[in-house]
Amino acid sequence: MSGIFRVAKYPARRSETDSGCNLPSVKQRELGRSGETIAVIGQGTWELEVADEKEATRALLAGLELGMTHVDTAEMYGDGRVEERLGRVLAGRRKEVFLASKVLPHNASRAGTRRACQQSLKRLRTDHLDLYLLHWPGRHPLGETLEAFAELQREGAIRHYGVSNFDEQELAEAVRLAGPGRIACNQVLYHLGERAVEHAVLPTCERLGITLVAYSPFGSGRFPSPGSKGGRALAEIATRHGATPRQIALAYLVGNERVVTIPKSSREEHVRENAAAQDLELSADDVARIEQAFPLGSKPRSLPTL
Ligand code: NAP
């Protein structure tokens, strides 16, 4: 796939969040076909339970101030301890956050999904989630999970719903079952070292009007070392932009207007660095250089996950 599609083809929207709070103007993008926008660069929370609580809290709140208001969590993270932590951190600031969580596949029967959602809401100390996802495809019929999502949405417990780790066929099936415009997003593994979603998942998202949420945008701690071929290419582009290699990596991922991302950091200086990536515009030459250093490769038999 050519990288040209990602260069300023779709100018990013800048808008105020809908929270009514005095947040800075941040780069936002439409979530699915909802008409609502979310932060292009949000915040992940996997393994947050092992981070120093004070430092991680400072980092998360700094991210909110910078407009990284899409906060992604899951009942799985730390067996509920990450949601509990978030509940403490976000007390009094809930309106500033676009809060996403996920149900585990083995809980995703119709009744189990409803139960899991209520437990997540309790741990998160809120009466609603902004986005609720099926963490990955499992043994319960997908139609049951989606019916539970629709019920929860009607009742006001969740505002939007979607899926995670779905390949293009699974995604098309989810849309068939839920109806057009209902699946807001597919959260999938996407970083420079793993571009497999560009083969079919991203084009399917574009065709069906579904947001692709790129998880592990830095390869989950395995970011290219400065001495590697990819590391050298990123450093060269970063120098041209007065930016850092990680900012270049994020800018590449969100160069497509259907993509948003959720880097995780429990350190304030890292969060600040990640937030600033939203202001970068890569040239066609930059994109070509990145794609040469991090080749797409052939389409794998199954969708890579973490
Ligand atoms: P990631 O965001 O790719 O990388 C996180 C690692 O990068 C941490 O070690 C972090 O360390 C470091 N880091 C972040 N910003 C940095 C910076 N500016 N400079 C240097 N180091 C930096 O990995 P991830 O946590 O796997 O993925 C992000 C989020 O995606 C998760 O937290 C989770 O919410 C979601 N996720 C979803 C799934 C799924 O199946 N749906 C799977 C995996 C992840 P510090 O904390 O020290 O900054």
Image (cartoon, rainbow, N blue to C red):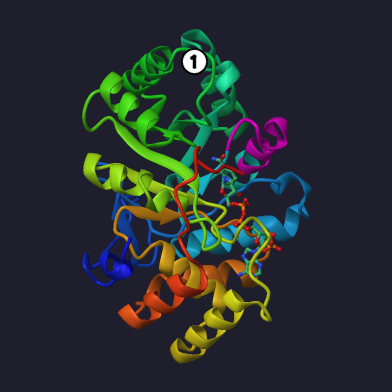
Tell me: residue 256, above or below residue 32.
below
Residue denoted by label 1: 114
In the rendered image, residue 50, in percent from the top left (x then y), is placed at 78, 48
Q: Which quadrant of the structure image shows residue 82?
A: top right
Majority secondary structure in the magenta region: helix
Residue at x 66%, y 55% (from the top left corner): 57
What is the x, y in percent for residue 54?
74, 57
Q: Is residue 75 magenta?
A: yes
Q: Report the quarter where the N terminus lies.
A: bottom left
Q: From this viewpoint, is residue 34 visible?
A: no
Residue at 50% x, 13% y: name it. Answer: 140
State the image quarter where residue 62 is shown.
Answer: bottom right
**Residue closer to the observer: 88 or 130:** 130
**Quarter of the rendered structure image containing ligand 1:** bottom right
Q: Is residue 52 above or below residue 139?
A: below
SS at circle 1:
helix
Picture quadrant where residue 86 is located: top right
Front-most of 150 and 232? 232
Q: Does residue 73 appear to the left or right of 179 in the view shown?
A: right
Residue 99 is left or right of residue 53, and the answer is: left
Identify whether 81 is placed above or below 117: below
Residue 72 in the image: state x and y as whole percent: 52, 44
Q: Of the residues shown, which amino acid type is indicated by label 1? A: Arg
| Residue 208 colored in magenta in the image | no
Which residue is depicted at the point 65% across and 77% down? 228
